[in-house]
Image (spheres, grey):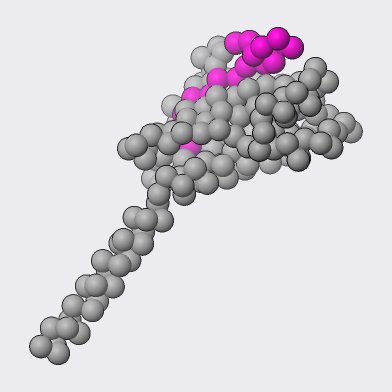
């Protein structure tokens, strides 16, 4: 009897480890992983690091409008970064939804591109209130909405499709 009990202890430990891994990969963790992915993308955008930005996208990535593939997206980013020069990207908390299968998700991000010498000090306090954040920004900066479809590949969340809409003062235009 003693031998069986000690023999099952490693089995129980394995089951506990698998249960821990299953619980640690919950939708909450997926949402946090997606938030980190978006945060990393913002930081890379501020650094103008196109190569690393593209590593956050799937191989079959498409950007809209324009049905831009990876190569075309790189060219657009290069032109945008040259236009803005040193910049800051400011945004409230992104919205997101992880599909029940845990392999697909969608996220939406309002963001503001500011040349480095401009600021909106109140925006940081409004990061959890997108509506008030938008009201504070008004028409004083270049405001965009980025809708993303994400896919989980080899345990990593990547952007599969991105739709960029510019705020025109009345609404977001495609």
Residue at image position (54%, 38%) is 56
Residue 88 at x, y percent in the picture: 77, 35
Residue 148: in magenta span: no
**Residue 90 visible, this angle:** yes
Toward which corner of the image does residue 141 lie, by quadrant? top right
Residue lying at the far right of the rendered structure: 117
Toward which corner of the image does residue 87 lie, by quadrant? top right
- Rendered view: 5 above or below 77: below
Range covered by the magenta-colored residues: 158-174
- Rendered view: 137 above or below 65: below
Residue lying at the far left of the rendered structure: 1
Residue at image position (37%, 40%) is 102
Residue 152 at x, y percent in the picture: 41, 39
13 vs 141, left or right, is left
Residue at image position (17%, 83%) is 5
Dominant secondary-structure state across the stretch colored magenta: strand
Quadrant that contains the N terminus = bottom left
Quadrant that contains the C terminus = top right
């Amino acid at each position: 009897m003693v031998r069986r009990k000690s023999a099952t202890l490693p089995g129980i430990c394995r089951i506990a480890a698998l249960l821990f891994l299953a619980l640690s990969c919950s939708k909450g963790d997926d949402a946090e992983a997606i938030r980190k992915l978006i945060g990393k993308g913002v930081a890379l955008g501020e650094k103008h690091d196109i190569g690393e930005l593209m590593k956050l996208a799937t191989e079959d990535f498409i950007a809209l409008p324009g049905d831009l593939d990876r190569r075309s997206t790189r060219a657009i980013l290069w032109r945008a970064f040259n236009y803005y020069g040193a910049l800051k990207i400011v945004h409230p908390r992104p919205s997101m939804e992880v599909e029940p299968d845990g392999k697909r998700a969608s996220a939406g991000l309002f963001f503001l591109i500011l040349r480095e010498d401009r600021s909106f000090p109140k925006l940081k306090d409004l990061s959890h209130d997108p509506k008030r954040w938008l009201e504070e920004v008004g028409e004083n900066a270049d405001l965009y909405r980025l809708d993303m479809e994400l896919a989980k590949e080899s345990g990593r969340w990547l952007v599969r499709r991105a739709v960029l809409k510019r705020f025109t003062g009345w609404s977001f235009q495609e």
